[in-house]
Image (cartoon, rainbow, N blue to C red):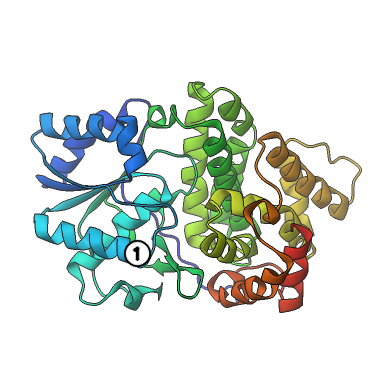
Amino acid sequence: MDSIKIFQTVKRIVMGCGSIKRIADEMKRLGCKKVMVITDPGLVRTGIVGQIEDLLDKGGISVTRFDEVEPDPPYDVATRAAEKTKQAGVDIILGIGGGSSLDIAKAASVLVTNAGSVETFFGIDMVPGPGLPMILVPTTAGTGSEVTPIAILSDYGEKLKKGIVSPHLFPAVAILDPELTFGLPAAVTAATGMDALIHAVEAYTSINATAFTDMFSVQAMSLIFPNIRTAYANGLNVEARSKMLEGSMLAGMAFANAGVTAVHAFAYPIGAEFHIPHGVANSIMLGPVMEFNMLGNLPKFAYMAEVFGEETGGYSDREAAEIAVEALCTLASDLKVPSNLSQFGVQEKDIPALAAGVMKVTRLLANNPRELKLEDAEEIYHRVL
């Protein structure tokens, strides 16, 4: 008998060039008049946040801002964002930015309305009740956080990233405007785009994948893989940017339900300990983890080669699976994404502790298509040192 599967996602998605101009109307539709904008200082400097706040002001929405989000944000950023949100007495949160800003918006939303510290919410379904309503606006085609019930925060003490997973983290609305991604530097386009592609790959190969999540995963891969090079080389290409943002969203829908696997489990310790950007950490770990995992489901790994546009006629599933892995590695190389941990100060002596950290990420390893042991984790880290 098939096991019971559940699929859940956001209620409303507004997408397309210029869709951000609907922001005030979307808040009014929700009956909200006073917003806390949660974002990061870098995005403020680009002028994007100010432009969106002007739209809100003209639409009659009162605006307060928290712009202290940092990469790989620790617990205290979420706590401070929640405290400022409580003090402001707002009725909605607007998260603008990459995954870090969107995740802090989610965490702040439930911290405002639920008793307890952020640590009490880590894990699956640990949030007691709904948070403040949210609208999330991604400015990168990367995390897909705008459509996932997950917020990732850094535990600097344990040198790990930890997740809050709850349906209460879904926003009321996600707005995807590709014009907001036009100004992304090429290196950021590459790293975030690889992150989105890896979400799709891992959701597709997760043991919890379903026909429904596969539909989203495959479509995400078919959008991201052929467009990421163009978006990287020509950031003003509207078609490429639009397809990247759509692909990132679909990948988010897929992994929000099927889960990601060991690539992310390997990325978390090195991200928390050495502050390697998340998309870069995932890209570094992608090749060796995929080579390890492919024996767990050769037909799916083989089919990915077809999705990537590779020639697979006459090849065995194993050979086609190797072609898929090689295509991913070639893509990362074309995008000039770093490929070695030593570039970030990781040394041989660090590997045992990092591998032990991987084994603690049980929430993700439970999705992996192949059982992973401590000695496997150490060997895989050695391969990319």
Q: Which residue shows up at 36% across the image and 39% down it?
A: 42
Give the percent coordinates (x, y) of residue 40.
33, 45
Give amino acid for label 1: Pro
Q: Position of residue 241 (x, y in %)?
A: 49, 29
Residue 85 is left or right of residue 122, and the answer is left
Q: Is residue 59 above or below residue 282?
A: above
Q: Residue at x 40, y 67 (%)?
A: 165
Residue 382 place in picture, x, y as percent: 77, 64
Residue 77 picture location, percent across and down: 31, 60
User: Quadrant location of the N terminus?
Assistant: bottom right
State whether residue 78 appears in this view. Answer: yes
Left or right: where 154 falls relative to 290: left
Q: Is residue 296 visible?
A: no
- Image position of 265 with respect to 11: above or below: below
Q: Viewed as shown, does residue 288 lie left or right of 123? A: right
Residue at far right of view: 314
Relative to the observer, which residue lies in front, 362 or 7?
362
Query: What residue sits 84% from the left and 53% below the top?
Result: 317
Q: Nearer the viewer, residue 40 or 316?
A: 40
Could you tell me which secondary element the residue under label 1 belongs to? helix
Q: Quadrant of the C terminus?
A: bottom right
- Classed neighbour count for the residue bearing mark 1: other residues with Cα under 10 Å, few (<14), some (14–19), many (≥20): some
Q: Nearer the viewer, residue 193 or 307?
A: 193
Q: On screen, 75 above or below 230? A: below
Horizontally, residue 384 falls left or right of residue 282, namely right
Mark 1, residue position: 167
